[in-house]
Image (cartoon, grey):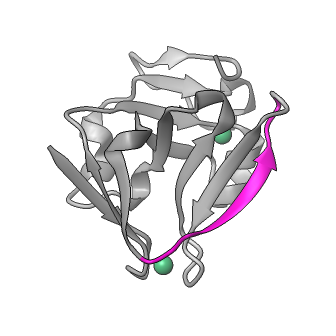
């Protein structure tokens, strides 16, 4: 199965060859800062299944709580956050689900796991059925 997605302006686009993905919300402070929103929603896929098909994203290396690098990739033109590579999760790519095409931003209506729920804004509640992690792992 091929999932596709892009940034807001369409300058950066990608494809994922995978049958399924792990749907993960992250409420950490870096995700809040990076997205400008309350959390990021992610389709976590094997890194080998993910390919940029258009444009060249810019990147920014943030040091996570682990002390390891979280590399954030974004469109240099419109600024959309597109995906993240975590050094602690070396064989996976965290695709920002809001960039997915064809309604896939809905993640099939299901969230598998929520990270950094300790930083979740108090006006949001746990997603029913999603595993709750105070931090990461
Ligand atoms: Zn763009
Ligand atoms: Zn995060």
Q: Which residue corresponds to the image point at 41% horizontal and 50% vertical from the top-left?
A: 97
79 lies left or right of 101: right
Instruction: Say whether residue 135 is magenta.
Output: no
Highlighted magenta segment, given as a residue range: 55-65
Q: Residue furthest left?
A: 1
Most foreground residue, 32 or 54: 54
Position in image of residue 28 (x %, y %) = 71, 37
109 lies left or right of 26: left
Residue 99 vertical position relative to residue 133 in the rendered view, above or below: below
Position in image of residue 39 (x %, y %) = 60, 45
Position in image of residue 15 (x %, y %) = 29, 57
Residue 74's quadrant in the figure? bottom right
Residue 72's quadrant in the figure? bottom right
Q: Which residue corresponds to the image point at 33% horizontal and 57% vertical from the top-left?
A: 100
Give the total number of marks visible in the rendering. Answer: 0
Position in image of residue 13 (x %, y %) = 36, 69
Residue 54 vertical position relative to residue 64 in the rendered view, above or below: below
Q: Quadrant of the C terminus?
A: top right
Inspect this view and state whether residue 56 appears: yes
Q: Which residue corresponds to the image point at 82% horizontal and 31% vertical from the top-left?
A: 65
87 lies left or right of 113: right
Inspect this view and state whether residue 126 appears: no
Residue 79 vertical position relative to residue 59 in the rendered view, above or below: below
Most foreground residue, 102 or 69: 69
Q: Quadrant of the N terminus?
A: top left
């Amino acid at each position: 199965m091929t999932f596709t997605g892009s940034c807001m302006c369409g300058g950066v686009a990608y494809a994922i060859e995978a049958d399924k993905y792990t749907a993960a919300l992250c409420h950490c402070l870096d995700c809040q800062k990076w997205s400008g929103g309350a959390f990021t929603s992610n389709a976590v896929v094997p890194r080998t299944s993910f390919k940029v098909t258009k444009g060249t994203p810019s990147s920014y290396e943030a040091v996570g709580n682990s002390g390891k690098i979280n590399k954030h990739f974004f469109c240099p033109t419109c600024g959309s956050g597109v995906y993240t590579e975590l050094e602690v999760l070396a064989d996976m790519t965290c695709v920002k689900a809001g960039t997915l095409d064809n309604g896939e931003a809905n993640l099939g209506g299901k969230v598998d796991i929520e990270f950094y729920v300790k930083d979740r804004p108090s006006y949001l509640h746990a997603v029913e059925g999603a595993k709750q992690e105070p931090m990461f792992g």
